[in-house]
Amino acid sequence: MQLTRFSDYGLRLMMMAAAHADRRITIEETARAYDISRAHLMKVAQLLVREGFLKASRGRSGGLSLARTAEAITIGAVVRATETDFAIVECMGLGNQCRITRGCRLRGVLGEALGAFLEVLDRHTLAELTLTPEDFGFPRAA
């Protein structure tokens, strides 16, 4: 199982917001901190705002902040919001063309494994992943 880059960036953005809970973060500083695409991060941020994980403020002092406490946000919820397809193999997805689907037991085993994967992510919160601003290379405010 491999998460998409979209989910990876979503989790990173959430971690950045949690690390700087005392202020709003920007797409620009987050892209710089992780050395990732600003344009791609913008799309991720839009989804996380729409899904209620982040709040966005416009204007000169605008930016992004957590919409809920880090303790109230599970990693599983973020991954479910950012992943569009959990079809590990063809028979688990739309448009299945596999000739042995009818008698194959693989889908059940992989479905069980996916459930276990998400169950573990549901047991952990954003608070458990929160780093300090120094971990991102930013000095702590005086």
Image: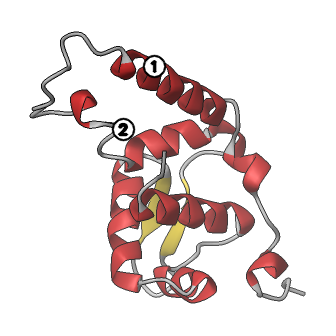
Residue 35 location (% of width, % of height) = 55, 87
Judging depth in this view, the residue of 17 and 77 nearest the camera is: 77
Q: Name which residue lies at 41% across and 84% down.
A: 38
Residue positioned most to the right: 142
The image position of residue 8, as x and y in percent, is: 51, 61
Q: Is residue 104 left or right of 70 when viewed as pictured?
A: left
Q: Farthest residue in the top direction?
A: 103
Q: Which residue is drawn at the image coordinates 70% and 37% (left, top)?
A: 124
Q: CA distance from mark 2 to mark 1?
A: 11 Å
Give above or below for 20 relative to 123. Answer: below
First along the sequence among labels 2 and 1: 2
| Callout 2 secondary element | loop
Q: Residue at x 49, y 56 (%)?
A: 54
Q: Which mark is residue 109?
A: 1
Q: For the point 62% across and 65% down, which residue is it? A: 17
The residue beneath circle 2 is 88
